[in-house]
Structures are given as C-alpha cells and as structure tokens.
Amino acid sequence: MILLGACAGWSLITAAAHDGRPEGMLLAVLAVAAGYAAGRVSGALLPVAAPCVGAAAGLALAVVLPRLSPGRWYTAPLGYAGATAALLALATGAACCAAWAATAPGLRLGMGALACAGVPAGIVVGSSAGCVASAAVLLCAVAAGSARGRGPWLAGLAAAAGLVAVTVWAVAAGTLPAGLAGALADRLPPQRVPRWEDALRLADRNSGLGVGPGRFGELSQVLPRTPLSDGRPHSAPLQQAAEQGLIGVCLLAAVFAWVLYALWRTSRPTPVALTAGAALTALAALASVSNALSFTTVTVGAGLLAGWATARPWMGDTMTSGR
C-alpha cells in the first residue's frame, strides 16, 4: 500500500509541476489495490473457486469483449493485442493456481483443462502473443511442481522481465546491432519503435519530473503523423520515464519487485506462488512492449491474481485454535 500510495502521490506531483493529467495513473493504482484486496479476501475464503471463476471470466473477456477482441483495427498502432494477450496469460495463471490448490484429482484435472484453454482461445481471437504467453505460463506451472525453492525461480522471473524492459530501452536508444534491431522491429506494429524513440527523447530531456502524466501525446513528434493515435508510447517503462521521470520508472519496478517478494514469503504452496509469478512476469513483459496496463480489466486482473496467490486460506480448525 505504501508503494501504491507513492505511485499515486508522485503522479500528482509531476502533474502539478507540468499541468499533467494524473487520472489514468490514479485509476490504475486504484484498480490494482481493489483487485489485490478482493483477491486476498476471496482467496482466503475460496482458494480454489475464486481463481477458477476469475480464470473463466478472463477468458470470456478476452474472447467476447469487443474492444479487446481483434478486428480490422487489430494491427493498427492503436490495437489491443497487448491487453488481449495479458488477459489470456493472467487467466491461464489463475486456472493453474486453482489446479495446484485443488486436492481432489478430478477437480485438479478440470482446472488443468481450463488452464489449457488459454492457448486455443488465443488462436480463436487471432492473438499470437496470447498463445505464446499462455503456453509459457503453462510450461512454468508444470515445471513449478518440481521446484524445491522459490528464490532462484523468482529471481529468474525478475531477470526475464528486466531483460525485456532493457531490450525495449536499447531498441529505443538504437544501441542494438542493426540486424537484431531490424528483426525485432519487423515483428512489431508500424510506428511502435518511433514511439519508443520519441518517449526516450522526452525522458532524456526531462529525467527529473518528466513531462507530466498524460502529456506524451501533446509533445510527441511522431503521434501527430499517426492515424488513430491513443497518445501513448505503448511501453510502460518508457511512458513512465517520459511522463514521470526516472523516479516513476523506479516506482513501477519497485511494485513488481514487491509482488515477487510477497510471492516468496507467501504461505501458499510453492507451485501456486511460482505460477502466479510466471503469469505476472508475462504481464510485465507484455507491458514493456504494449499498452496492456492502460486497460482497467488488466490491472484489476493483475491485482486479483497477486491477491489469490498471497492469501491465507481460512480453515475452521485454524480459526478455532486461534481463539
């Protein structure tokens, strides 16, 4: 709560300094906090049913919700590919957590089938990123069953998320070899890399307080030439750097690091903690290359998954002994 409060407070400070619009950041903080609180409560009462219902809801939203399902606009710069892929990854992670929490073999098999549904759901909606993210979470969930310690696994997840963010930063800075940078750019929607370069340019000029929340679209040199622009660079770290300076980037990284720390300390089984960590790492990677965190459904889902994975189930005998 202290970190989320710091994120909200810093967005207000940078907004006051540059006449920015902090409403988007405040809504994201509120969504994560509300999702986390709801996840802790529902996960304590219903450690299997709550993530199961959440997984089914996430899959349904990714397939049915019009603004998250692909259409002719899907490959445009404004597209919703990142949000769809993030929902599929979070839904797969929630279903895997429910499977690991279940004790009855039949129930665990059913939760496993629900978890596997994320990959074909990605095919149905045309999200290759969603297929890859869901498959990666599934593989990590299977591997988590044989894990003996959490520390090295969670450290590896943190390194993977950091590697994606550093690669995006390097692409924006033009420090990657030309061949590798070209190969990466070819797999991204048009104007994505110019947006990143624009965000890094603003961050270099305003490394302290940034240009103010919500002002990237006003000051960008690329967006005026981009049709259907949503005013974002489609990279959470670069957007934070451009709009809220280096402190904003550090706060964003600190929130992710705290989530991994909470998963390391949770009393839930190790496979549950590691599976949730894998899904949230997939979200972090997607947020580095898209605008996934701009969708309230995604930020609420991230909070819910973190809450389910760190909740303490309430057992009748434990409550009685506690009295």
Image: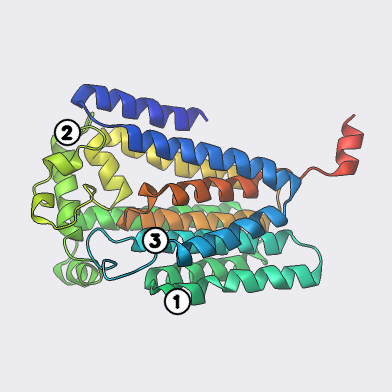
- 188 lies left or right of 33: left
Taking depth in this image into account, of 69 and 109 the one nearest to the observer is 69
Residue 206: numbered disc = 2
Q: Nearer the viewer, mark 2 or mark 3?
A: 3
Identify the residue at image location x=39%, y=71%.
127
Q: Position of residue 266 (x, y in %)?
A: 66, 45
- The amino acid pointed to by label 1 is Val
| Pick the front one: 281 or 83 | 83
Mark closest to the chain's N terminus, 2 or 1:
1
- Residue hosting label 1: 124
Q: Which amino acid does the dot numbered 3 rest on? A: Leu
| Label 3: element kind | loop
Residue that mark 3 sits on: 68
| Callout 2–callout 3 Cβ contact below 8 Å | no
Q: Residues within 10 Å of mark 1 (few under 14, many from 20)?
A: some
Q: Is residue 290 visible?
A: yes
**Neighbours of disc 2 within 10 Å: few (<14), some (14-19), many (20+):** some
Q: Quadrant of residue 250?
A: top left
Q: Which residue is found at the position 40% from the left and 32% from the top?
A: 7
